[in-house]
Image (cartoon, grey):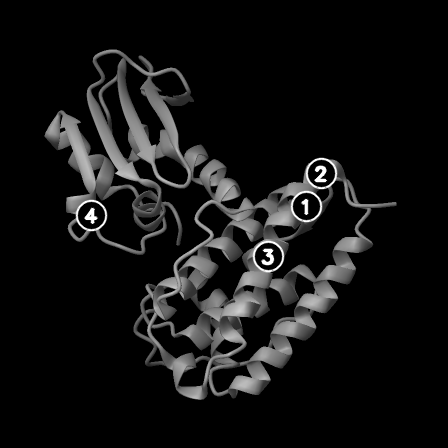
Amino acid sequence: MSLHPTLQSYADAWTHSIEAITELVQPLVEGEWNRRTPLPGWSVRDIVSHVIGMDCEMLGDPRPIHTLPRDLYHVTNDAQRYTEMQVDVRRHHTSPEMTSELEYTVIRRNRQLRNESREPGTKVRGPLGTELTLEESMRSHAFNVWVHEQDLRAALGRPGNLDSPGAHIARDVLLAELPGVVAQGAGAPRSSAIVFDVHGPVEFLRTVRVDIQGRGTLETAPALGPAAMLTLDWETYVRLACGRVTREAAADRVKAEGDPDLAEAILRNFTVTQ
């Protein structure tokens, strides 16, 4: 048996991103592993450690037994503590140790995907003891690895792959969160419409309509006379949605029309990742 067709796009996206990450870090000298990234408290080494750790968990490996230091200012909740464990345990690994473990983990994951015969709805282990379907797990993983590829590119000054298979998975994941951002997060008025016009390597025009009950839905049809309209490039959209840049820092790359208070509220609640 082979991978279910529903899961193939997620496997392809992961493969593309993990190969790009491997290519990015392979030539790094020791000092470059300590470069800052857009994630507070995390270096290039830390992001690669996180990617390795995520794939080890996809493989079903036991989590490391490790005590976190008390002075990690960027770790403030249980979800962050859970994530940090795989990072901190590798914090003093050398460049050869990092690249060797990454390569070995990729080999194991490729073997796992070649032999994967489970149905998309199969329940699997998720973070913090949660349970989710295999499809949800693989989609989330493909999204996360692509986002971290972009983090590494930003840290190393190597932009690229903004239109890769992982970018299209990211578009769908982030768009699924948009109705909640507008309706619940920003509290957009009932019976209103907000338009998002995104240009660049990945382009889309979407409308979030808020019904009389205050629920938001995503539509591809443009709205006439929307309450607000936000126009921005794809990279800025991703960086805002993933909390890599503040709305103030990205102000010159976002054009807002219509109700300025509503537009500000949307941007204030735009981050949907932890």
Residue 8, given in percent of the width and then of the height, sits at 69, 43
- The mark found on residue 129 in the picture is 3
Dot 4: within a 10 Å radius of its alpha carbon, few (fewer than 14), some, or many (20 or more) residues? many
Dot 1: within a 10 Å radius of its alpha carbon, few (fewer than 14), some, or many (20 or more) residues? many
Residue 105 visible, this orientation? yes
Name the quadrant of the C terminus.
Answer: bottom left
Q: Are marks 2 and 1 in contact (CB under 8 Å)?
A: yes
Q: Rounded to the nearest whole Å, what is the CA distance between mark 4 and mark 2? A: 37 Å
Q: Which residue corresponds to mark 4?
A: 247
Amino acid at dot 2:
Gly
Q: Is residue 269 above or below residue 243?
A: above
Amino acid at dot 3:
Gly
Q: Rounded to the nearest whole Å, what is the CA distance between mark 1 and mark 3? A: 15 Å
Q: Rounded to the nearest whole Å, what is the CA distance between mark 2 and mark 3? A: 18 Å
Closer to the eye: label 3 or 4: 4
Residue 97, given in percent of the width and then of the height, sits at 58, 85
What count of labels does the image hold?
4
Q: Which residue corresponds to mark 1?
A: 134
Dot 2: within a 10 Å radius of its alpha carbon, few (fewer than 14), some, or many (20 or more) residues? few
Please, what secondary structure does the residue beneath circle 2 have?
loop
Q: Rounded to the nearest whole Å, what is the CA distance between mark 3 and mark 4? A: 33 Å
Name the quadrant of the N terminus.
Answer: top right
Residue 131, given in percent of the width and then of the height, sits at 63, 48
Q: Which residue corresponds to mark 2?
A: 121
Amino acid at dot 4:
Arg
Earlier in the chain: of badge 3 and badge 4, it is 3
Q: Nearer the viewer, residue 272 or 240?
A: 240
Q: Is residue 160 left or right of residue 125?
A: left
Q: Residue at x 22, y 43 (%)?
A: 268
